[in-house]
Image: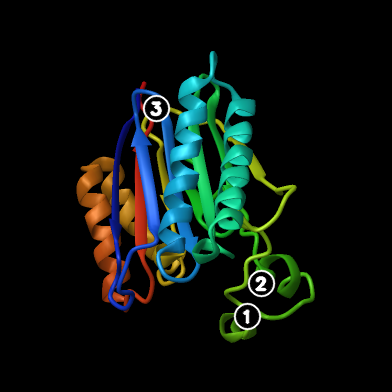
Amino acid sequence: MSEAFAMSDKGCVRSNNEDYCLIEPELGLYVLADGMGGAKAGERASRLAVDTVAEIVHAAPRLDSQVLLRAVEEANRRVLAASHSDPELEGMGTTLVAALDLADGFAIASVGDSRAYVLDDAGFRAITDDQTWVNEVGRPLGLDEESLRTHPMRHVLTMAIGASAPLSVNYYSVPLRPGALALLSSDGLHGVLEPAYLEEILRRARSGGLEEGCRELVAAAKDAGGPDNVTVVLVRKSA
């Protein structure tokens, strides 16, 4: 069983927190979502998506990568159904990144721009690819990074839970040795902190406490202005 800690904060600008996360180390399941939509719809979407993934994984007779993918697809169906059944929830959606600790490593599924990173003996690296206009259109068009940072389409997602059916899910299988550290984050963290700074904090967390690492990550995002909700999940792979 791996060690884990999670923390979520509304940040410095937003009046409510539309992020939601869940950690179940005894099951090896870690899920994070960043909701969107008017009124309380974003909060409803993120919580419904995360709770659905947990429900499907709990009910599975055996755990494998297909269970995780089925859980994400069911989350999409339920968020779509909820948005269609209540006019106040119309148009709601959420990003989602979920990790399942399996015998051969972490199975990771992502939709949208919430991310998974790994820090191990090979270094620090992002595992997931953002499903965004910047990543899927802007960069392939050859736009430089400076232009992309200020582009009017920079916040546009190309995929989200609750946005469409069928759903496009990015899937990754990541072998992890004992002592490796995984980070799941909403864009309220990685959208404001440079990768080098994330790595610096994670290196301290890898050798120290995960709770302290989560607190330092959230504080760093807020010190950088905290323009969005900030949610972080840290998982240290056990032997």
Query: Residue 79: x, y in percent?
Result: 56, 50
| Residue closer to the observer: 49 or 211 | 49
Image location (x, y in percent) of residue 58 = 45, 24
Q: Position of residue 180 (x, y in %)?
A: 40, 36
Determine the secondary structure under disc 3.
loop
From the viewer's perspective, tell me whether residue 145 is left or right of residue 214: right
Q: Outermost residue toward the right?
A: 141
Q: Are marks 1 and 2 in contact (CB under 8 Å)?
A: yes
Instruction: State the residue in front, 132 or 67.
Output: 67
The amino acid sitting under disc 2 is Val
- Residue 100, x across and y down, in percent: 49, 31
Q: Looking at the image, which is closer to me, 1 or 30? A: 30
Q: Quadrant of the N terminus?
A: top left
- The local secondary structure at tag 2 comes to helix
Identity of the amino acid at label 1? Leu
Mark-to-mark CA distance, 1 and 2: 7 Å
Residue found at x 67% / y 66%? 135
Does residue 123 appear anywhere in the picture? no
Q: Which residue is mark 3?
A: 178
Task: Decide which of tag 1 and tag 2 comes sooner along the chain.
Answer: 2
- Distance of mark 3 from mark 2, alpha carbons? 35 Å
**Mark carried by residue 148:** 1
Residue at image position (24%, 65%) is 219
Q: Amino acid at mark 3?
A: Pro
Could you tell me how far apart the alpha carbons at marks 1 and 3 are, in whole angstroms? 37 Å
User: In the image, what residue occupies the spot 43% across and 55% down?
Assistant: 44
Tag in front: 3 or 2: 2
Where does label 2 land, which residue? 134
